[in-house]
Image (tube, helix red, strand yellow):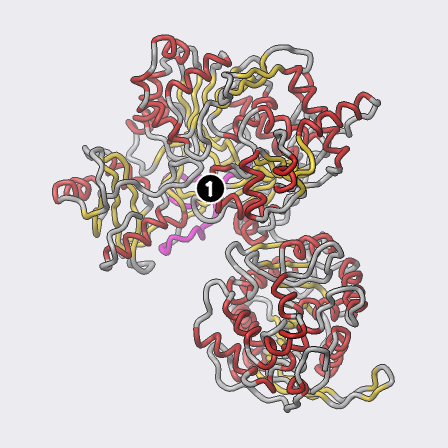
Amino acid sequence: MRSGLPRVAAATAPATLPPPLPGLDPTWSRLVTVPGTARGGAARPDRTWHLLDTAGSLAALGVEPVGTILCVHGNPTWSYLWRSVLRTSLEVAASGGPAWRVVAVDQLGMGFSERTGDAHGLADRVHDLGALTDELGLTGPVVTLGHDWGGVVSLGWAVDHPDLVVAVTTCNTAVHQPDDAPIPAPLRLALRPELLGRATVLTPAFLETTLAIAHPRLDRRVADAFRAPYRGAARRGGIGGFVADIPVDAGHASAPELDRIAAGVAALDVPALILWGPRDPVFLERYLDDLVERLPQADVHRFEGAGHLLPEDADVAGALFEWLGDHLPGGHATTPAGARLQADGERGPDASRPLWAALDELRDSDGPALVEMATKDGPRTISWRLLARRVDEVAAGLLDVGVRHGDRVSLLVTPGADLTAALYASVRIAATVVVADAGLGIGGLTRAVRGARPDWVIGALPGLAAARALGWPGRRIATIALPGAARRALRVEHTLAEVARRGARRLAAGAALPPAPAADTPAAVLFTSGSTGPAKGVVYTHGQLGAVRDALAAQYDVGVGTGLVAGFAPFALLGPALGARSVAPDMDVTAPRTLTARAVAASVAAADATVVFLSPAALANVVATAPALTGAERAALSRVRLFLSAGAPVSASLLAAATDLMPNATAHTPYGMTEGLLMTDVDLEGVRAAADSSTDDGICVGRPATNVRVRIAPLDDAGRPTGALTDEPGVTGEIVVAAPHVRDHYDRLWRTDRVSRLGVDDPRGHRTGDVGHLDAAGRLWVEGRLQHVVTTPHGVVTPVGPEQRIEGVPGVRRAGVAGIGPSGTQQLVAVVETDRGVRRPALAEPALADAVRAAAAVTLAAVLVVPALPTDIRHNSKVDRTRLSRWASSVLAGGRMVRP
């Protein structure tokens, strides 16, 4: 045995069938003996494998398989890992879908296969798997599926069987160890000679650690099933041998085979699916990056919150068979359903006018382009001339320090001149900007940045400090000068000023900036608010961002000469693209409710602004702080001609109150999302007219904007949007939009992207996850989020209508309606904030509860009052009804009456 492994690791034992175990059909198990062969000049004895095989089950169903899925486990698991894949394959076949035979092997020395007493190197394992598939008479088409080091073995088999393999799929694996990075710490520890045998063979420490890092924690019976083949040191020799076989450097015996497989993977010309659990202490994101580089055709899905034991942590089986249904419906490759293809005869977004075109056109103007309000010396104005020059210099400087076409540049900078210059400089050279704003909160921001895997980080001190402390990836550029010690501690390579100086020298020497990128070149990764789950990265191309700019300009007549106050970062960043002078008000971007009326008035005056864009939470505080305005400040606000509020539902009363502050402005509340920033629009008069002429539930968000199509996917009795898309009035369902300025795709979220396009016949389409309906006048009414639909014994209930009626009760400031109990029998609960406020959560007083019940027009199981409803961080507006549901379920079941 290898150095560090005890003699017991060489113990032998025959292959056996497993005992009865949860989730494992005993009819799947079989033993297969592979006749001995001569290899490398030495005779090899017969070897017996245990494997799981659905061939018999498919025969019992009377169906012929369209192909085989060959599943290979890693260390220290066994074929039990793939039980959900076997079960799901049979469910798909029984329902009339493609019948895939699944063969899940126990590698030699592992699971219930034979304990040979021999060392099995990587080359041996790939060869032995090939000998087994030969014995099985396996013919194509074959899809490989591997996890951990079983991923390497399965990919090695695929490289060696190009005539059989039609697709490769993996879960948390790696085929290359970078020379400039150490192997992960847990493996370094396990490989120490004094620990290797003790941790992997003599004790079950390595096995137990692997089982302990599942997310969520494994059920005890499932964990015991994984332990079943490894009880006793004599059964764990394969675990130690696997760890010892990790090629830690080029001198390792298995390094040449790993290099061969890595090179072969890059040459594979078949569809690929990479599934990933980011909470993996061993297979880090750098290994995912390497796989994506070798398999650029691969679809990638990161299961946020999942870890190393991905098939236990996430729905790998469901994702796999959805992917196979799209790519290999009959066992052979075809154009995937929902692929990002342009319809025949349809032009994509026009990129003839690049995002920075207005900046170029105004580069000789000394007029104001940006006004920064949150500076210690008062407002600072940046001219178009200075901004255009700065963007050019930073763009040339970024090229000079090594930023390349397609590199990802994370911008950890608050809105202002530095952020604007860095953003436009990056897209100017075809880098992709990653805009994960502080409004996500530190946890959400960490997940976003790690998931986006930036190559570069441009940050102010708070962002750089967080990047260093939390291990965010990317080479670092600071927006400020730093002392040497701080620079070293934060791993800062350059400052933005240094980058600009290098760029100025480069331009002065005659260097030119590259031509504008093609329309389909990725330009930005923006992040959703995270109000209904982990924030998702949304990829926009240059053409699509240009289309966003054009949609806003056309809808609101915003362009050259417009002064824009933007309290929402994505809108502020589009100011230079629109040719509008823009100002970011003095506020905490993580707390929109900190924005005051005086701060807005100061911003309007500083930029001579005529357009104001605020989130509903910011707008509410602006209205609340209006009594502090001076006469001059009120006069400044009277010059505003248009104000917009979006990001969450905006009530007519709030819009009306804002209009009192800006009496010459038209109030609009556009409807959109990160995936499509302007889908519909309505003004205050439209909101009032809809309320006066309709009894519709929900919030009226107006008619579709130019070039936008809105349809509805009707809900079934279980609250699922299963119906065919329709624009018939009065039909409640999921809102589906299509427009040239809808996002391109979700970043490394293949399954999410697929769901967002499912059943949508327009390549520019997007399922929003919102529910609502169209009325007879073609206006859209939003009734809530799909996951917040409540399925009661009396039918489906959407939450916004009851919430609005409850908010009309005297003394109620805001309401959230959520469901508790099992789907189909859920009960409704109302949770309210009151005007008087309460110090702690409680059941509502009888008079208030009676009034709320009477107004809601739905049956309520309980009415509770809270100091504050839980909301998202970015907007401080979207009520977290999922959290409310969990909280209400707990307190009404006798749990502690804590804040939600």
Label 1, secondary structure: give it: helix
Magenta stretch, main secondary structure class = loop
Return the residue nearer the eye: 682 or 201. 201
Q: Say which residue label 1 marks.
A: 441
- Estimate the x, y position of residue 892 in percent, counting from the top left: 23, 56
Left or right relative to 307: residue 897: left
Side of 101 relative to 856 (left or right) = right
- Say if 604 sits above or below 436 in the image: above
Q: Which residues are magenta?
A: 717-740
Q: Seen in the image, is 537 located left or right of residue 808?
A: right
x 48%, y 48%: residue: 534
**Label 1: how many Cα within 10 Å (few below 14, some 14–19, many 20+):** some
Q: Position of residue 717 (x, y in %)?
A: 36, 55
Q: Amino acid at mark 1?
A: Gly
Q: How many marks on residues?
A: 1
Q: Position of residue 148 (x, y in %)?
A: 63, 67
Say if 553 sits above or below 215 in the image.
Answer: above
**Does the segment drawn in magenta span residue 726?**
yes
Q: Residue furthest left?
A: 847
Give the quadrant of the N terminus. Answer: bottom right
The residue lying toward the viewer, choosing from 610 and 548, is 610
Magenta stretch encompasses residue 253:
no
Q: Position of residue 763 (x, y in %)?
A: 60, 43
